[in-house]
Image (cartoon, rainbow, N blue to C red):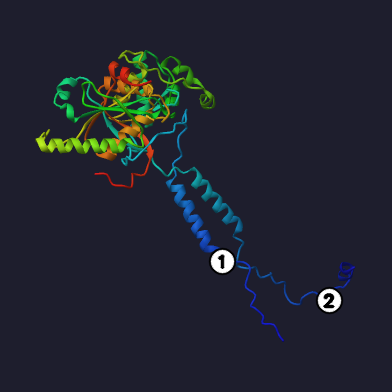
Amino acid sequence: MAELESGGDGHKGKKRGGVRAKKMSTRIDMTPMVDLGFLLVTFFILTTTMSKPKAMQVVMPDKDVKDSTQMSKIRESEAMTILLGSNDRIFYYYGQTQPTVEVTYFNKVRKIIKDKNEEVLALQKANGWQSNGNYNGVYIGIKPTDESKYENLVNMLDEMKITGIRSYAILDPSAEEIEMLPK
Amino acid sequence: MSKIKMPKSSVSIDMTPMVDMAFLLVTFFILTTQFRPDEPVQVVTPSSTSVSNPPEHGKIIVTIADDGRLFFDLDNQVFRKSLIEKMGDSYNIAFSVDEVNAFATGSSIGIPMGGMKNYLDMSPEERKKVEQPGIPVDTTQNLSNELGVWIVNARIAGNNPVILIKGDSKSNYPAVKNVFKTLADRKVTKFGLITADEAAPVEPIK
């Protein structure tokens, strides 16, 4: 009813004077812009790759250099061999002749390497065994078997870095060594 | 008793600082983001405490998938053009300009040279669908060891690139051993293994 009445009310309600533009508010509604902004933020946060890959430097023994010339300088008491087996097992032995192979795992190997390194360093210092003017500590040969995973090798190289082993090499296990390993 | 009237505060708050912040973040992420290139295979790298960053440009990446397939990547378009031409020379395959361009704009590749021409003739959409068999590798120094030929040619084409191996943590060692051996046969004794970040152990070890 009200609408009808207002329609018939004539010019009574009209303002006098010129047509004045309605004063617009200076504030605009920023909500859609903010929505869009945060959408973009979310998108870029999710797609961005913040952690850049790292590279671990590896130096392999040169094939043409005869291993025996290098290896013969190492005394048996300074050597340690680490074999990487299946199921993340680690086999290790000291020295060269008639070794007894022991098994360990990645959570324990750090201490074993560290202890052996300290033992060898003490021995080297007591006897004055230097090579190139340094006490090198234990010499480690890392021998991954065919059953090991790439992860095992990388973890072992990382252990070398963490324990501060100066001389180590990635070598192939010999047939006798594979024979020695428990299945 | 008359009630104390609280002044009615405005419902709309000033969003300007928040908007400033949001767009600052947008700008930051737009500028820093790098879209990862299409990779034919997803690789989970093992983690290590290494902190050295591989160079942004000028690198060869050999990817080892968890099933032992190998993929080869050289990162610069100009280098890639000259690389595929050199590969064509090695295997007596003449690549057309379109094929060379298709290779140059691609990324990691795991196609044997025998199927390379067919692969490069496909449309980009078709190429994405191809299940790549991986680059053949063996322990010889012949042309049958295609990874070796790729490495030799890429070192010539790529202006002394850094060689990086990106292995999946679950890949078996024999696949890795073949790559190591191929590199050693080509007189590459220094290379990098790409790893993810890992916090160094808290306890300092002397």
Q: Nearer the viewer, residue B200 or A89?
A: A89
Where, by quadrant of the figure, is residue A18 drawn? bottom right
Give how far across and how far down residue A119 sits, in percent.
19, 37
- In the structure shown, which secondary structural element does the residue marked by tag 2 occupy? loop
Q: Is residue B137 above or below residue A57?
A: above
Give me the disc on residue A58: none
Name the spot of residue A134 as percent of width and height, x first.
Answer: 13, 37
**Label 2 belongs to which residue?**
A12
Q: Is residue A76 above or below residue B112?
A: below
Question: Which residue occupies the foreground of this view, B114 or A98?
Answer: A98
Q: How would you rate the neighbour count of disc 1 (Cα within 10 Å): few for under 14, some for 14-19, many for 20 or more?
A: few
| Residue B161 relative to residue A128: left or right | right
In the image, residue A168 above or below residue A7: above
Residue, x 20% and y 33% (percent of image)?
A138
Residue B88: x percent and y percent? 37, 17
Which of the 4 image quarters holds residue A84? top left
Q: Residue at x 87, y 69 (%)?
A: A2
Q: Which residue is located at x 67 percent, y 80 percent?
A: B5
Q: Say which residue label 1 marks.
A: B14
Could you say which is closer to the camera, residue B160 or residue B62?
B62
Q: Are marks 2 and 1 on the same chain?
A: no
